[in-house]
Amino acid sequence: MRRYNINSDWKFRKGDGSPAAVVTLPHIWDIRGGQNGNGGYVGVCVYEKQIEMSDDWKDRDIYLEIGAAGSVAEVVVNGQPVGTHKGGYSLFRFNITKWMRPGQCNRIEVRVDNSVRDDVYPIAADYTFFGGIYRDVNLVVADASRFSLDDDGSEGIYIIPEITGGGRGRVRVYSVVDEPEGCEVCCQVLDQDGELCAKATVKAGKEPAELFIEQPVLWNGRSSAYQYTLSADLLKDGKWMEKRMIRFGFRSIRLSAESGFQLNGERLFLRGVGRHQDREDRGWAISREDMEEDMALLKEIGANTVRLAHYQHAPYFYELCDREGLAVWAEIPFISRLSDSAAARENALLQLTELIKQNYNHPSICFWGIGNDVTMFGAEDWVEEALREMNALAKCLDPGRITVCSHMMTLAEDSPLSAITDGIGYNVYYGWYVGECSDMGVWLDELQQKQVPVPIAISEYGADGILTYQTGSPTRGDYSESYQSLYHEEMLAIIRAHPLVWASYVWNLCDFASVNRKEGGVSGRNNKGLVTYDRKTRKDAFYLYKAEWSGEPVVHITGKRYKRRAESRNTIRVYSNAEDVELFVNSKSMGAMCKDCHIFWLDGVVLLPGKNDILVKTERGDYDDVILYGEPADEPSYLFRQDRNAEMREVATEYRVRNGYHSVYDTLDEILDNPEAKKVLEEEAGADVLSQPLLHTLGALPLESIARKSGGLIRKEWVVRLNERLTKVKKLQE
């Protein structure tokens, strides 16, 4: 088998009649539109390439292999339709042999469509659906007898390593071979130094190869991510045909309500973050270097797990997780808005099949996620049926891994949906969209008292933090970096105090594109990341987790971007894993700072007018410093204010607003707090709709934002009508 990369020199044209251009793959169209809230081009675009068919390809099969295309791709060769792939995140192949013309130039077209469809997931979600062929494209030329190229994009080999009695390692190797008659599979296991550990040869298509290793080294997460290599050679009638080299690891995993998550028999509290694959100015067309940068951030913060939301990520990132020892929660985009059509059900099952088969051999993957926020728009009976079908499929394809599903925090603990998978996650946004941070502690206490039999993870929690917004008095909904830090301080303490939480994932590692968002004065962005979208700036909360999780020395003064302070007395806060921290202001010692775990602080610090040198030192000798300015102003200019948000709305509002009156740009909580406005909303939406649990998680969002996130369920005409009525209702005097 030979693989030829064909990324270069594709002719690209949009379906709107725009002039054609020559592009190099990976490629995303209208990146900026997907990142600034304008939406960009949605629809069909065509990639076209001319291929000369080599003479040595005769009598061999030719496959077009596409790493991923968002989100529906139709392949046409020499004007003839070959096939269509539905799903924007997985590798797929088409056998194009019979449409290729030997000795001629062959025209390959890939027609990619990023339109929202009811039969392809995701239908709606809180991130941008970028369009394009955004991973590598290859031509694969293979003999008729080969490791299968038609096995849902897999490598055609499945490795099952396990520890038997006495600590002996057994490796079973299942291979899928096309035209296996007369073929043998010769397997060798090599250690990390390339030394031979075991070998076995079996007839293709028969029983699996079995290989045994005495006392194998375990893949043990961050402490020791040891991997072996399987070398598998395919022979036909004694003639060598091709080779596969696949890394794998020995490890055991278990999950229970009593003992939480266990890796190799030892309990391990999983603490990590969620990750989206997109990057500023590149969308999903990211490089290996981009992925390595994200991995470096994960290692720096000290995470031992990552939730790869909400779809299949690039193969190389799973390899990085294997190498660095991160436990992976991998999932499919069965998310938010669902469809009960047979075609949609089939698509969810296909994407789950591709996820599992294509990533089966990664030791880092511990969890198969089959859904996220599946009750956002209701919990119909068919949703339960669909989840049970997908859970059964996951267990059939891979009985050795743990199945999980992420649910909204409003899901009742005794819901039948919570008992389908091995474990469940809750997406919990107390302290941001609704209530106070302390409410999560109360909620977890109640679950603990009820002794819920299902293992519980916090699969999402977070708050937006925008660097330009700083304040000495952070409050929920101010979008400040200051509040984001305070939020995570409280949430981290709550999670620490509740050992029933076997895993927790901060939402998110980095800010990411979300075309439907217009919040905090920023369009097209979810700003809950611990790191900015461009990866250049670690927010204060990043260092809190680094101090908590990492073994590296950490000392970080928070609020460094809050340089000009109007308060007469200030609180200086520090995140550190040192035992003691001493504060100096203008070279004068203020003494040891107060301490709670990894948080240090000193209240009542007076800043002189003008420049102030702030320095903190630890007993280890490491330090951090910043210059702050004492300003006799009422308020620094960069504090986020609601009236500034209103100004932003005036500039780019789609719906009419009146000063002093309500509109759809007000939050749900603001509307419900005004009896007259609430009555209007009840009349337009219905009291039964307002009683839905979903709305209890959306109180801090503007009605206009809720409508945009509904995936078309809330029609624009209704929003217009509601807005006209609300603009006649005066706001209450504060």
Image (spheres, rainbow, N blue to C red):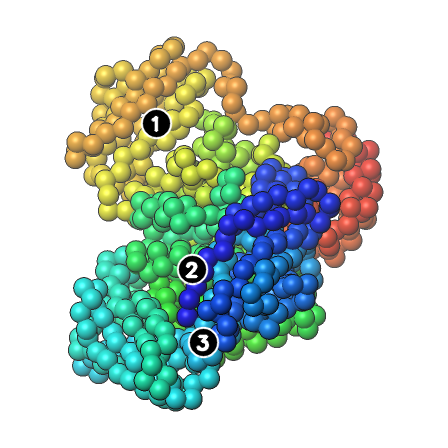
Quarter residue 233 falls in: bottom left
Q: How many marks?
A: 3
For the N terminus, which image quadrant?
bottom left
| On screen, residue 179 above or below 71 | below
Q: Residue at x 28, y 19 (%)?
A: 585
User: For this view, does 366 lie left or right of residue 87?
Assistant: left
Number of the label disc, if any, that sits on residue 315: 2
Q: Residue at x 73, y 54 (%)?
A: 713
Residue 522 spot, x, y in % from top left: 58, 34
User: For this view, does 724 lie left or right of residue 526?
Assistant: right
Residue 493 spot, x, y in % from top left: 37, 47
The reply to whether dot 1 and dot 3 touch (C-beta < 8 Å) is: no
Q: Amino acid at mark 3?
A: Asp
Q: Residue at x 40, y 57 (%)?
A: 316
Mark nearest the camera among 2 and 1 is: 2
Residue ID for mark 3: 143
User: Which element carries disc 2, helix, strand or loop?
Assistant: helix
Q: Earlier in the sequence, mark 2 or mark 1?
A: 2
User: Which element carries disc 3, helix, strand or loop?
Assistant: loop
The reply to whether dot 2 and dot 3 touch (C-beta < 8 Å) is: no
Q: Nearer the viewer, residue 431 or 655?
A: 655
Residue ID for mark 1: 572
Q: Residue at x 40, y 49 (%)?
A: 288
Q: Inspect this view and state whether residue 92 appears.
A: no
For the C terminus, which image quadrant?
top right
Q: Amino acid at mark 2?
A: Pro
Number of the label disc, if any, that sits on residue 451: none
Residue 77 spot, x, y in % from top left: 63, 64
Rounded to the nearest angstrom, the CA distance separating label 1 from label 3 is 68 Å
Rounded to the nearest angstrom, the CA distance separating label 2 from label 1 is 44 Å
